[in-house]
Amino acid sequence: MIYDRYASLYDSSGQVRFALLVAIYLRELLLRHPISGSRMLDLACGTGTLALSMADEGWHVLGLDSSSAMIAQAESKAAGATLTGSTRFVLGDMRHVAYVLPPAAFDLVTCTYDSLNYMTSEADLLSCFQSAADALAPGGLFIGDMNTQHFLEFDWGTCAVREMEGFVQIEQSHFDAQMATSTMVLTGFVGDDDEGYERFDEVHVERAYPSELVDALIERAGLMVEARYDSFTLSPPDLYTQRIFWVARKAIGAQHAAPLRDSTTTL
């Protein structure tokens, strides 16, 4: 299971920076795409940094993640936080939130930091968009990002090493052009020179999708695409864009999407 051992090291390894940038970026996007209400659902919330940042601005945020270790980190951070709004964290599969959350209960749904790229089938990606649509109140907004194929194929790189006190992280990546997937083997060493090191390995697979297909799946789920942005800008994507942010609004009276195949995944 990915993120089990890595969860306690996730923030200190530098991953926390992305969520902090997203929190700032969301302010810009919500000025361009306004909504009423302050109820937010953060799908694949990880260690809860984005949820806590938004709650500090007055949002009432529910974070959902399939990793119990990541949820534990989020809850630990929330326990010591003084917030203007509120946070709550639940364990669940972002493809099937209807099993754990009430329908039409949120004004904003987010899913960021490559989380949608981990959906390696069109059926699973559609299920995530359907989860967002089901969770949104009429007129509510979905904001999510995905790495592009250009980034995964040409910009990601094949090997990276991060050295921190008490932790060394090695990332080895391979891109399969036929499947449009990048497989990254993350190897971590936790410890010190005196006591020795504990090793763990995780395999992360991300798939890139053509933006037109993502548009179609979002709309099939009953959401209306309002904009696509080059990552952290208000400019449209181009051929060299590394990450695209989608902004989509729930259509009033939208119908549920027909599944591409039967799903046997359970929470």
Image (spheres, rainbow, N blue to C red):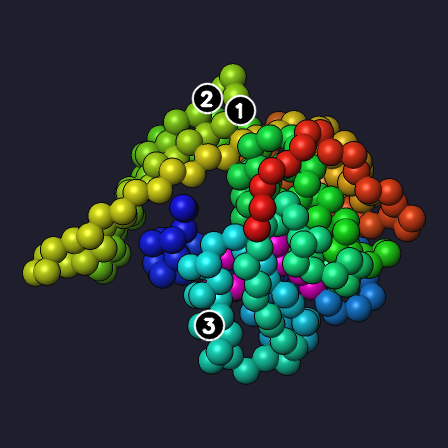
| Residue 136, horizontal then vertical, whole percent | 78, 56
Sequence-earlier tag: 3 or 2: 3
For disc 1, the marked residue is 180
Residue at (71, 48) in percent of width and height: 131
SS assignment at label 1: loop
Is 215 located above or below residue 255 in the figure?
above
At x 68%, y 72%, the residue is: 60
Q: Amino acid at mark 2?
A: Asp
The reply to whether callout 1 and callout 2 are in contact (CB within 8 Å) is yes
- Work out whether 151 lies above or below 63: above
Relative depth, front residue between 75 and 168: 75
Which residue is most to the right? 253
Q: Amino acid at mark 1?
A: Ala
Q: Return the residue at label 2.
A: 176
Quadrant of the rendered image containing residue 119: top right
Tell whether 3 sits left or right of 51.
left
Q: Earlier in the sequence, mark 1 or mark 3?
A: 3
Q: Mark 3 sits on what residue?
A: 77
The secondary element bearing badge 2 is classed as strand
Q: How far from the left and from the top, in percent, is residue 191?
A: 18, 58
Residue at image position (50%, 19%) is: 177
Using a 10 Å C-alpha cutoff, classify the residue at mark 3 as few (fewer than 14 neighbours), some (14 to 19) or many (20 or more). Answer: some
Q: What is the span of residues highlighted in magenta in the rendered image?
A: 40-48
